[in-house]
């Protein structure tokens, strides 16, 4: 399994956990939860960039 697929699976699991257990998409979401989702996505994009960069090199 490539690193990109593994990172994508981990990201999807994190989003599902955030939706189900942390109630990120609830009617009343705090600012901290929203920032947490953005940070999780930023980490995903950075990891995806470096994994793809290392695969091509």
Image: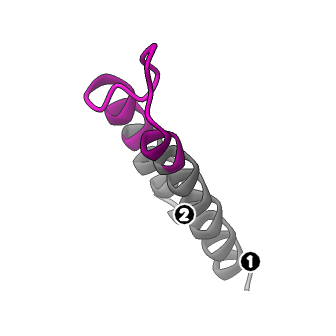
Q: How many marks?
A: 2
x 41%, y 50%: residue: 10
Residue 8 to residue 29: above or below? below
Q: Is residue 11 above or below residue 45?
A: above
Residue at the spot x=36%, y=35% of the render? 18
Q: Residue furthest left?
A: 21
Where residue 19 appears, as percent x and y from the top left, is 39, 26
Residue with the mark numbered 2? 43
Q: Which mark is residue 56?
A: 1
Answer above or below: position of 19 versus 1. above
The reply, left or right, for residue 15 in relation to residue 53 is left
**Where residue 21 sits: x, y (%)?**
25, 28
Extreme-top residue of the structure: 27
Position of 24 compared to 44: left or right? left
Circle 1 SS class = helix
Which stretch appears magenta? 14-35
Disc 2 or 1, which lies upstream in sequence?
2
Which corner quadrant of the image does residue 43 belong to? bottom right
Is label 2 in a helix, a strand or a loop? helix
Q: Nearer the viewer, residue 9 or 42?
A: 42
């Amino acid at each position: 399994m490539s690193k990109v697929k593994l990172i994508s699976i981990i990201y999807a699991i994190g989003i599902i956990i955030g939706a189900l257990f942390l109630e990120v998409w609830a009617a009343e979401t705090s600012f901290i939860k929203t920032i947490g989702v953005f940070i999780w996505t930023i980490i995903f994009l950075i990891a995806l960039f470096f994994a793809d960069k290392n695969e091509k090199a």
